[in-house]
Image: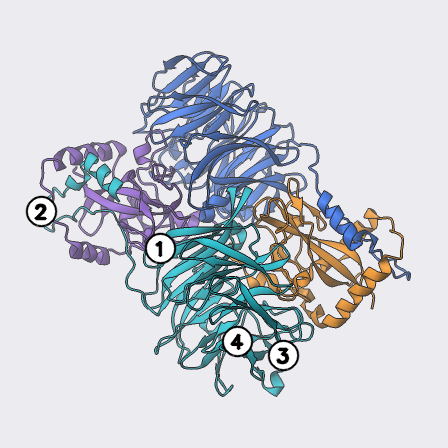
Chain colours: A orange, B purple, C blue, D cyan
Amino acid sequence: MMRRFDRLFEHSTRSLAQRTSRRSLLASLGQVLTGAALLPLLPIDRASRAHAASDSPASPESCDYWKYCAIDGFLCSCCGGTSSSCPPGTAASPIFWIGTCHNAADGRDYIVSYNDCCGKSGCSACDCNRNEGEKPIYRPSRNNDLNWCMANANVNYHCTVSVILGVAEK
Amino acid sequence: MMRRFDRLFEHSTRSLAQRTSRRSLLASLGQVLTGAALLPLLPIDRASRAHAASDSPASPESCDYWKYCAIDGFLCSCCGGTSSSCPPGTAASPIFWIGTCHNAADGRDYIVSYNDCCGKSGCSACDCNRNEGEKPIYRPSRNNDLNWCMANANVNYHCTVSVILGVAEK
Amino acid sequence: MRSTQLFCLALSCTLLAALALAAPPPLPVEHLTVERLPARSPHWIYLYDEVFDNEIDARVYLYDGDSNRRLGQINAGFYTSLNLSPDGATTAVAATYFARGTHGARTDVVEFTDNSTLEVTHEIVLPSKRAEAGPGLFNLAYSTDGRFLYAAYLTPAASFGVLDPGAGTVLGEIDTAGCVLVIPSGRYRVSSLCESGRLLTVTLDPQGHEASRAMSEPFFDADSDPVFVQGVPTNSGYLFLSFLGQVHDIDFSAAEPHFAAPWSLLAAGEQGHWRPGAYQVAALHKSLGRLYVPMHEGGEGTHKDGGTEIWVYDFATHQRLARWPMKPQGLSRVIALQVSQDPAPILFVATENGELAVFDALTGRVRHIEKHAAQSPWMLLNP
Amino acid sequence: MRSTQLFCLALSCTLLAALALAAPPPLPVEHLTVERLPARSPHWIYLYDEVFDNEIDARVYLYDGDSNRRLGQINAGFYTSLNLSPDGATTAVAATYFARGTHGARTDVVEFTDNSTLEVTHEIVLPSKRAEAGPGLFNLAYSTDGRFLYAAYLTPAASFGVLDPGAGTVLGEIDTAGCVLVIPSGRYRVSSLCESGRLLTVTLDPQGHEASRAMSEPFFDADSDPVFVQGVPTNSGYLFLSFLGQVHDIDFSAAEPHFAAPWSLLAAGEQGHWRPGAYQVAALHKSLGRLYVPMHEGGEGTHKDGGTEIWVYDFATHQRLARWPMKPQGLSRVIALQVSQDPAPILFVATENGELAVFDALTGRVRHIEKHAAQSPWMLLNP
């Protein structure tokens, strides 16, 4: 199957790309990491997450989905996983790159980690490449070209998930 | 790339399929093998072969080409070889299946061997599947589903050639 | 997952909670997990994708015909043979691998995947003789009790390996005198198809060694009307279709195979015009007795052309019940199909353009079409 | 070929001569051979196909821009790094392989292919540290005299391996303190790009061990305008483009890199609207001084969008000479490009839809379009 850039890049969220400068993203990440350590862990409300997803104009099977603003690869949602869980029989990468994505549903920016799911060959469904805030390999924490399965026992690449780490404070 | 059957099967030579019955093909092969052993080897006129190819309504890069009536795979003509030579760096299979193909240019039927070229992964160009006289695996000499690289040092499949063995006597 | 959690703790990512307190509350942090399969369903299908352009990366997709979602993937290597264990709990995948991906030292191996986790549990390394053949149920087949696994060999000399999937060992090799494939029945018979139109049946002892062998009378003519090797399980054995549309129903329940009189898929006016054709040429709902066959108009040499229609038969009476054309559904030619075995059956249909269509197997109504399900969907299996 | 001939003799196939004597004479029997490559041409191109849907089967196609034919294939495994030797005689391919195709024990290895035969001549097994990164010239690079081969490592700790391609050995590993990739120059310097916008340059002794290292001043800002890592060889070093269209021309001919004042691809009115973007972001004809850049309209985050046009510059004067839009040629966006270095140069253009277009590099005239040249054509190399 051709890796079609028209499919990859022609999405509605492209206009969000210039929303936030690089420096403010990085400053925000620093604040979140610092601030979050002072707070107790909030309970996870899976129902509200599902609700938020269904409120989104795009589904987690769509490349347009808000959390995917800096993803590069096959969406695990199409491969037997979800937007934040790996498909059965694969292993999640312990290392990841990050993005800062705007959730139109609540008007907030979120820090998202992109983890690869590893140990099977490419799932070959829902290829999605978006590059908001993506940086070359000399800034690896923002680079989506690397094989982030590199530190797994089995480094083969299967698909990619996005995991909300927290709100990006302004 | 999808293996598209429309591409594979929608070719002009399909109407030739019922030209010769199975029994006559097999009887013909027997005659050629027997008769040919009595004859000296004729010199090979590469120019006339090239001439014949260019007279053909289809080129050796086309699935419609007359010699390909029972081929299944990538045409070596599109992979760095020709209709009867393997691409550089591959190895020809010493075993093969055969077909009996009608050459409209001279009105003759020819016995053709189909050899696989081996040792590199699929060339992925000019996928061509035609099945005139093709038989299931219990008649292996007429089966084009088998990996005919099976007896090579490296059994990976790259592409397929067709080699004229002689005229199929009626 | 353990290492993931360790890394997350190091980064304090489990503490990255939402900070904004204004309504609505921010989305909570998420925790990366690995999905578990739901309980097995009769509406699951194992879709074999041969990936013809990149054959070293064949795979099996597990797909759910109720949720219309892919559930997972089993990798399947180069020139794959595969089958499910009789209890449906295991997928056995035999493939060839190379030390350098596309070249280098060859290893033939059967790998066993736990169908409840999609993880490989163990493997059996084979001699480098495995038949690298077209898809079908008889390249690699379990004995009916699951005790043995039979692997067809072709070098091109024909034989088969007897494997012990429980112990993970090769028990032996049995020569088949030019006859091919492994058609399992009873305890412990393996039949092979011969060019003469006969079946060779080898009976094994409980240790997997040859106890006896017998050759049947011819039941087809490889010259005038060969049978497809893609046999279909029935209640008492297997059916085989011929290129011209004869149905050979073979009872394998006794020591010697018994051949019912063949019947034709075609009415008089259809003979010579319509014929079956596909990579997987029929599916049978065993308890309802419904037979589904991809059919097309075409002559000699078109036996791998996909079906433009699916014809539905009552397997007991041989009556044709329906013709379901694909074009009105927006579907290309049918190259593989399978029917679930439950009382509310689904017919799964794979096409030359890589579509996977989910039909109501009783009415022919299309429930769902997956547009890009696979690159080369050549076989569909269900437990 | 030897075994083929033996088999043919056994079958008497060399004696299967034409029997019919009536005019015209029948076609002669053919003899199966293996093709040899013609003499190397400056119009050859090595097209790297990453095969994104089936990444374990990446490959390099050798293509001739004069005959418009594919000449052969070099297999390239999983997450490949590749480069040509300085004399063009060898293709070095570093890739990862698994004992079971898609899984199992990992082996990282560099394989060397003789470009006159397309056969692998030897290999070097690497530690399992190879950087599995996007395409570019600096994942795997020869020293300018071909004596050493440098392989970027990333685990994610950054370092590089020094290899001896002649002896087939790993000489050592050098830590790069967080800076990445291997940019070769002189005898024997390896520079790496740092997040700070600096270049780290490690100088090796003739045994391949570190002799000294130096850090440059910053030449770009990774926050405001990062550079693409896909550098392009110039007569004295490499040029790097930035996301916003600055051209950084770096002279690597002395012990320390020298940075010319950057210049912009964009006129005043184009700033903020147009930018470069692709997987391979520029090509330079070194002696003619012509620079070719795929350009598109778009903002932040579009740096991997392919070019809707190719803009042509005089590299000495920084003047834009031409804009060549792709759409009128029926071509999709440009994701990789390369120019031959001869006096009648060809510009090779690979697109997002897998087309390979052959342009006259002087006039922009399209000489040929290969519609389905590759699945994921991410890089083009020529000797």
Secondary structure of the residue carrying tag 1 is: loop
**On the image, numbered disc 3 is attached to which residue?**
D273
Q: Tell which of C204 and D4 is nearer to you.
A: D4
Give the answer, above or below, for where B98 lies relative to B121.
Answer: above
Numbered circle sitting on residue D118: 1
Q: Tell which of D264 and C222 is nearer to you.
A: D264
Name the front one of labels 4 and 3: 4
In the image, what residue type sits under mark 3? His
Name the front one of labels 1 and 4: 4
Instruction: Give the letter of the chain under mark 2.
Output: D
Query: Badge 4: few (under 14), some or many (20 or more) residues near its Cα, within 10 Å?
Result: some
In the image, what residue type sits under mark 4? Ala
Instruction: Give the letter of the chain under mark 1.
Output: D
Q: x and y percent of residue D170 in the render?
A: 49, 54
**On the image, numbered disc 2 is attached to which residue?**
D22
Q: How many marks?
A: 4
